[in-house]
Image (spheres, coloured by chain):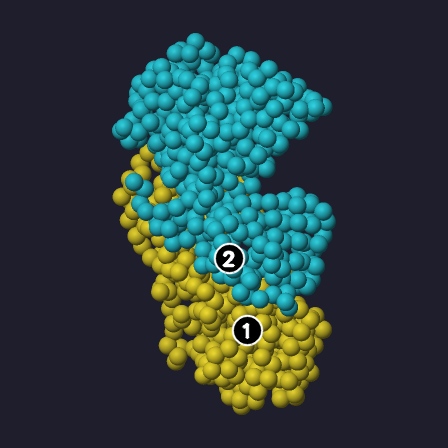
Chain colours: A cyan, B yellow
Amino acid sequence: MAVNLFIPNESDIFPVAGVEIGIAEAGIRKAHRRDLTVITLSPGSSVAGVFTTNRFRAAPVQVCEAHLATGDEIRALLINTGNANAGTGEKGLADARQSCTELAKLLHLRPQQILPFSTGVILENLPMDRLIGGLPAAVTDLKATNWFEAAHSIMTTDTLPKIYSTQLQLSGKTVTITGISKGAGMIRPNMATMLGYLATDAGIAPALLKDICKTAANHSFNRITVDGDTSTNDSFIMMATGKSGVQIDSIADPNYNKLLDALIAAASDLAQKIVRDAEGATKFITVQVDDARDSDEALKVAYSIAQSPLVKTAFFASDPNLGRILCAIGYAGIHDLDVSKLRLWLGDVLVATDGGRNPDYQESDGKRIMQEAEILVRVSLGRGKTTETVYTCDFSHEYVTINADYRS
Amino acid sequence: MAVNLFIPNESDIFPVAGVEIGIAEAGIRKAHRRDLTVITLSPGSSVAGVFTTNRFRAAPVQVCEAHLATGDEIRALLINTGNANAGTGEKGLADARQSCTELAKLLHLRPQQILPFSTGVILENLPMDRLIGGLPAAVTDLKATNWFEAAHSIMTTDTLPKIYSTQLQLSGKTVTITGISKGAGMIRPNMATMLGYLATDAGIAPALLKDICKTAANHSFNRITVDGDTSTNDSFIMMATGKSGVQIDSIADPNYNKLLDALIAAASDLAQKIVRDAEGATKFITVQVDDARDSDEALKVAYSIAQSPLVKTAFFASDPNLGRILCAIGYAGIHDLDVSKLRLWLGDVLVATDGGRNPDYQESDGKRIMQEAEILVRVSLGRGKTTETVYTCDFSHEYVTINADYRS
């Protein structure tokens, strides 16, 4: 049961000039499931990526990083679901490389021009015969209008497809941004992974795109949490084809900020959709920490609240349990925190001040906020001027049910 | 439903010479509930304590620290359940001090010779009239044999009392160690708190007892986790009366190590009992990390496993889900971890090696281990010689049910 997850009409998804997508049924884990996606990019495109920090980096993540590091022009992405190719050692690396080699043959590219992605069960080898067998059909299917199909094709435990599309005007030209993501909250590393793909027909210099990709990730995919588990395969890729005729080569370009904001908004939407579809989620929670000395301490407090099982079960119960939130702030690891300067709001209701309950606070006001499907928790630390925001969901019976199910 | 929580017979609880305990019904939160406990110590006793690191330290914790810092001889402890006196600001501090003053009058002591402890709801003021009204009855009740009653009296959401008692021979004399603890896993900061009290009739120099208390806490109460939430009131107190005639003033004393080991064993037992009685627990999990470079990185990995909701739901489901454990190791924050040197055991079964599944591992072997009520997860990092062990439980439907209940 996703929380207010908006799915645009297919007619509102704008193709991105220079990007084509093809999908096939390879039968990697289940028959009759479209599980193989190929994305191609026109020559001259820029590509950048950020990847999981988990030390058990899956084989395709390692191959992506190696191929990006060659500096060769990336021209295609290959994504399979059903198997994560993680915890598979040297054989896994060889399989990921071979996938690229086989697709390169079909597309007349060099293997290092291809980025591979896998999501699904871990600790099992990729069924290479089926994967390779599916490639010709995916290549035959390549077309500009397959974004919606791709959003479906990359799903694993997701209940709904995640897709975003917008257009903006830059220097009188129309620039398109379209992206897809998947992941039921990075919370099921044997069956799930966070994947995000965002394409634009703006042209962006490779070094600049790398910075934008990192910035966008830090405002989006790196600001969501369901249970604190970081998958072995998480990847976020940005692609810029330049086909719109708009080209941005430096941050001094007058269009830079407008495009950056639009790309961050797109990444943020795709990331938040993952939280909205998180396993068992019934509420979407925004945790905003204001007046911190720096980003690091703001995030410590925000994640301490957002990852506390006690706080999350209280949200599930619509219980304005101030004690649990204050307690989570208290153990966030800010050793010189002066709790007497702290203020806490639920929505627009000031619930705690001066190190304790706001004398004017009425439990009924807190209860009213907690019953909503979207809740803002706001903390002022009274220490500085930095704000950070993270997004999470509540913690329900359904979460335990889903994750206690035997892998099947 | 506690997991193998051993409750000794009342006849196996040895009183500690020099310690008396009195209990009363003060009606602090509920009527007809023994909720007030007084512990007195004979003159010449040493007392040491370790307290929560939460920045929202409850008023009694702050008063305990202040009274211990005076250097005056601590002669009594006052413990109430039903109200934590936390998040109560200046009024809370005044209330905690007044509690000590009133008990000091009855016992003919100075207020700073008393340590106060509170556990129960937070953000509400102590009902001082009822607390003070209950003190005379508690003092009248003082006797050496009230340990079992005290274990019951300090309970909040605990389903069972937690008590430990042993005797050992030092230099031909019998030394007694008896202690109690409470807490359903530090997991319900509005209604629960970890409290531990351990007394011995050995004599221990105050500075030495302080070190022993910290060491014992680091091997016990600081090695358990249910959900990572650290309460505002957590306290662990060690008391040494000297009445056995055995006196230890330095680590050079030939009896020191034997007594230290016995005290650590006692604290460890009392701490593990909290995990065994954790809300919703159906399994007791020991996570042992071997061959780490230092204690810090061993604990990072151990807690990363022990606090992962995904790992804990897999234990609940008896699912030998290796991927979730490997993933938790991977994101524990050891940036130069070489996963190819890592080995993982479930019980005596080697399940992962060389960065992936052990080729000889049979799922049926893993399943057999996971179905037991007590499970050992052992990781070798292959980096050094340090071992650390933490204790946790699984994560069940019952946990969500208990914590999603409205506070009542």
Instruction: Provide the residue designation for mark 2.
Output: A370
Q: Nearer the viewer, mark 1 or mark 2?
A: 2
Task: Identify which residue, B278 or A393, lies in the foreground.
Answer: A393
Query: In the rendering, at what x and y percent does residue A113 appear?
Result: 49, 16
Point out the image quarter for the N terminus of chain B. Answer: bottom left
Give the letter of the chain under mark 2.
A
- Horizontal side, residue B335 vs residue A103: left or right: right
Residue located at (37% from left, 77% from top): B9
Query: In the rendering, at what x and y percent does residue B160 appear?
Result: 40, 71
Residue located at (39% from left, 11% from top): A106
Using the rendered image of the protein, determine whether residue A247 is visible from the camera's viewpoint: yes
> Residue A354's quadrant in the figure?
bottom right
Neighbours of disc 2 within 10 Å: few (<14), some (14-19), many (20+): many
> Residue B244's quadrant in the figure?
bottom right
- The tag on residue A224 is none
Give the letter of the chain under mark 1.
B
Neighbours of disc 1 within 10 Å: few (<14), some (14-19), many (20+): many
Residue located at (46% from left, 11% from top): A109
- Horizontal side, residue A210 vs residue B323: left or right: right
Task: Identify which residue, B92 or B392, lies in the foreground.
Answer: B92
Using the rendered image of the protein, determine whether residue B173 is visible from the camera's viewpoint: no
Q: Secondary structure at mark 1?
A: strand
Q: Are the numbered discs 1 and 2 placed on the same chain, yes or no?
A: no
- Image height check: is A336 above or below B360? below
- Image height check: is B1 above or below A197? below
Distance between mark 1 and mark 2 Cα atoms:
24 Å
Q: Secondary structure at mark 2?
A: helix
Residue located at (62% from left, 60% from top): A350
- The tag on residue B83 is 1
Give, as a three-letter code, the residue at label 1.
Asn
